[in-house]
Amino acid sequence: MSKLLRTGLNAGEAAPMAVVGGEGVYFHLADGRKLIDGSNTGGGLGHRHPAMVEAIRRAADTPVVNEGWTWIGREQAADDLMAIAFAGEEDWVGAVRFCISGSEANDMALSLCQALTQRSALATRERAYHGITGLSRNMTVQPQWHGGLAVHAGGSKLPAPMAPVRILPAPDGAIYGGAANNTPPSEYLADAPRLLSDTAATIIDYTQGGIYYDGAYQDEVARHARQAGSYWIADEVVTGAGRAGRWFAFQGAQSRPDIVTLGKSLGGGAAAVAAVVVSKEIVERLKGTSWQNYGTLRGHPISMAAVSAYLRVVADEKILERVRHLEKLFSRRLLAIAQKHSSVRRVAGQGLHWTVELHGPDWRTWHADTAEVPIASRVAERALEAGAVIGTSGEQTSLFLAPPLVISDREADQLLDALDHGLDISDKERG
Ligand SMILES: Cc1ncc(COP(=O)(O)O)c(C=O)c1O
């Protein structure tokens, strides 16, 4: 019996499959199988991309330099991020601080806003997940992630949040199963001035809970946040750095955030790295003071080399264009799959991140104090037979697809075929 205290996106004690290697979009398993890696938001370039392997090899030959010292590779990564990913955004973007995880980036950003505004309350939208530490956990409004024993319905009390949390309604954009009458955000956000009035920050992400980018929603939230004196943080930990089919999801609308948080793919899957990017205005505000939140391993030479290498690959291999092409393929095929399977309730997505929600228990009543394998996990298990690993999102009825951005059309079709195969089981159970 392993001494590892496991965790994951599913309830239950089943040990996940054992990965022993990988190449491109494939995982290699201990039993010899090769499976398409269909839901790995951290692995933007798949496995062992030659440019990433080479960059990490070279970076292994560098000194151990902590965040308190100047490291040329860190300065370079910051310059590359601005010159490549933020090209065209120069009129507002200010500077970047690197860190290790998306949770940490959000915690840093949220606490900075509290310090700048001298307010403690924070806002997010329904079904948000912003991380698992500090204020990022505070803003994760799905109760099972609150660091306790994930008992939601069973009666154990959640710990009190560190800061008051205001929750905005979410947009419902979906290619299948969306709301019949599409109310404009100005209507359903009518209460936003009251909700945001005493908040330090309003943090919005673009995938969690199956809620995706909506330009009109973004502009409306940004406007209300500005009026309330609440900093707007675009949590682009999943969507940033390419997955949305542009460098950042927020670029689809007029408004621009005060802070952008990044992570996951930022190191091309080859290193643990995340970032907080602040506006010029915030850089001005920080003059004459010191934003003190030093971390020992932040901005490590290996992570910095991974960031620079990743950004170059995305630009050189024209990955954003590929993602936009694949978005159409996914949208077309997922719509057909939804129409074919009676167990599918809703499909939404953007770029190379898609959520398939099944009929079943309402996510609000989800609880993890159960040995029963949730329906989404049973679908994912069946998809393995057809050669692909599909993730579930911690809610009983949601599956998500987020393959490496380098996936070919043929591999994308195989992944979608595997989902199609897996859904037979949920159709059967629904009767
Ligand atoms: C939108 C969003 N923000 C933040 C995070 C936290 O990132 P990490 O797992 O690197 O701490 C996640 C992780 O899934 C996420 O989806």
Image: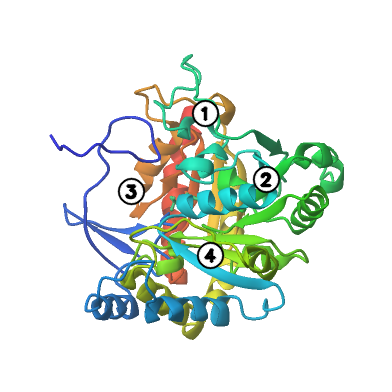
Q: Position of residue 22 (x, y in %)?
A: 26, 64
Q: What type is the residue that disc 3 sits on? A: Leu
Name the residue carrying label 3: 384
The label nearer to you, 2 versus 4, is: 2
Name the residue carrying label 4: 243
The label nearer to you, 4 versus 1, is: 4
The label nearer to you, 1 versus 2, is: 2
Q: Name the secondary structure under disc 2.
A: loop
Q: Position of residue 364 (x, y in %)?
A: 58, 27
Q: Would residue 341 be seen by someone viewing this image from the given angle? A: no
Q: Residue furthest bottom?
A: 316
Name the residue carrying label 2: 118
The label nearer to you, 1 versus 3, is: 3
Name the residue carrying label 1: 430
Q: What type is the residue that disc 4 sits on? A: Arg
Q: Name the secondary structure under disc 3.
A: helix
Q: What type is the residue that disc 1 sits on? A: Arg
The label nearer to you, 3 versus 4, is: 4
Q: What type is the residue that disc 2 sits on? A: Gln
- Find residue 34 and report its image quarter: bottom left
The label nearer to you, 2 versus 3, is: 2
Q: Are marks 1 and 3 in contact (CB under 8 Å)?
A: no
Q: Earlier in the sequence, mark 2 or mark 3?
A: 2
Assess disc 3: are there few (<14), some (14-19) or many (≥20) residues with their C-alpha within 10 Å of its C-alpha.
some
